[in-house]
Image (cartoon, rainbow, N blue to C red):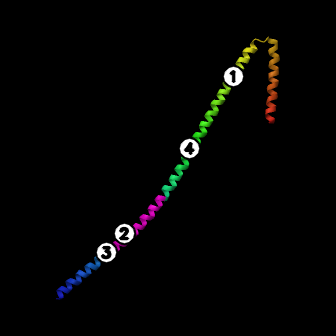
Amino acid sequence: MTETLDERVAEHNMLTASVKRAEDDLAAARRRNLELKAFGSDVTGQIDELNLEADTTAKSVRQAVKEKEDKMVAHDVLKLEVKRLRDLLNSRADQAGSIPPSSTSCFRSSVESCSVNSLYSSDNK
């Protein structure tokens, strides 16, 4: 009978130790679970920040592309205007070629005075 009691006490001690280890393992697992949840929450926050930054950057890129396209269009319009003015100037120069030389010197002096006057008047605007 004492042998049976000793066996039962030993079995009880072993089971108590096993339960204690299982409780310790459970507590450690719960702590680790809380740590992982906090880490997951931090990662989710970082992902949200990066998504916001990516959206902002994409919007900035779209705006920069739009501005570039607008500048390219303005540049092309200016090129067309320069071509039109150059063609106009060439046609006027061709017309001026048929004017006698004495008239062209008068024309040149009036153009120079007109150009000087237009420079001063455009500065005052």
Mark 2: which secondary structure? Answer: helix
Residue located beneath label 4 in the image: 61
Question: x, y percentage for residue 7?
Answer: 20, 83
Q: In this view, does 68 lie to the left or right of 2?
A: right
Query: Which residue occupies 55% across, 47% down?
Result: 57
> Amino acid type of disc 2?
Ala
For the residues labelled 4 and 3, the Cα–Cα distance comes to 58 Å
Q: Is residue 98 magenta?
A: no
For the residues labelled 1 and 4, the Cα–Cα distance comes to 37 Å
**Is disc 3 in contact with disc 2, using a CB cutoff of under 8 Å?**
no
Query: Which residue occupies 25% across, 82% down?
Result: 12
Crowd band around label 1 with a 10 angstrom C-alpha radius: few (<14), some (14–19), many (20+): few
Residue 86 picture quarter:
top right
Mark 4: which secondary structure? Answer: helix
Q: Which of marks 4 and 3 is in front?
A: 4
Q: Nearer the viewer, mark 3 or mark 1?
A: 1
Q: Which badge, 3 or 1, comes first in the chain's sequence?
A: 3
Q: In which quarter of the image is the C terminus?
A: top right
Q: In which quarter of the image is the N terminus?
A: bottom left
Q: Is residue 33 magenta?
A: yes
| Span of residues in magenta | 19-44
Q: Which badge, 4 or 2, comes first in the chain's sequence?
A: 2
Residue located beneath label 2 in the image: 29
Query: Which residue occupies 74% across, 13% down?
Result: 97
**Which disc number belongs to residue 86?**
1
Mark 3: which secondary structure? Answer: helix
